[in-house]
Image (tube, grey):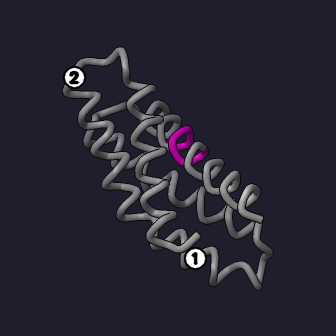
């Protein structure tokens, strides 16, 4: 999968994940959550993509993925904390859930395409 396809898949999966998590929230929180999911992914995805590429030879693929995803979760949690706004534990939980879903979608893609 090329980087643009991976970015678009991540934006859709994270947006849908957050929409499901906030489905019972008031409309403003739902809209803000989806916006954070989409725009934070747009901002962090290139760093994760190229960070994994750069770190893979030194630490192995899985360690590079886990490290990049951990940093992305922390960065995106800040956006959820202040834009939605959410408390820190909830912001981190939403970020981890959204990023785990998009990472899983990417891994499923690679397993099927292999």
Instruction: Give the number of the disc on residue 51.
Output: 1
Q: In this view, does 56 lie to the left or right of 71?
A: right
Residue furthest to the top = 24
Q: Which part of the image, by quadrant, shows the C terminus? A: bottom right
Q: Give the position of the N terminus as an image quadrant.
A: bottom right
- Please provide percent x and percent y for residue 78: 38, 49
Alpha-carbon span between mark 2 and mark 1: 35 Å
Q: Give the range drawn in magenta.
A: 96-100
Element assignment for label 2: helix
| Nearer-the-camera pick, 89 or 69 | 69
What residue lies at 63% left-to-right and 80% top-to-bottom? Answer: 53
Residue 28 higher or lower than 55, as above or below: above
Q: Residue 81 carries which label?
A: none
Residue 11 lies, with reference to residue 32, above or below; the image says: below
Q: Residue at x 38, y 30 (%)?
A: 19
Q: In x, y percent, where is residue 46?
A: 45, 72
In this rendering, position of residue 108 left or right of residue 45:
right
Q: How crowded is mark 2: few (under 14 residues within 10 Å), some or many (20 or more)?
A: few
Residue 97 is one of the magenta-drawn residues? yes
State the residue position of label 2: 27
Task: Locate residue 57: give its quadrant.
Answer: bottom right
């Amino acid at each position: 999968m090329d980087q643009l396809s991976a970015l678009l898949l991540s934006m859709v999966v994270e947006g849908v994940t957050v929409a499901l998590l906030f489905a019972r929230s008031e409309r403003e929180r739902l809209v803000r959550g989806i916006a954070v999911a989409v725009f934070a992914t747009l901002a962090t995805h290139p760093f994760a993509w190229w960070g994994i590429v750069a770190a893979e030879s030194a630490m192995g693929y899985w360690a590079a993925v886990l490290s990049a995803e951990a940093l992305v979760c922390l960065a995106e949690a800040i956006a959820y904390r202040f834009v939605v706004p959410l408390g820190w534990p909830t912001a981190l939980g939403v970020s981890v859930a959204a990023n785990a879903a998009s990472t899983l979608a990417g891994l499923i893609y690679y397993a099927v395409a292999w």
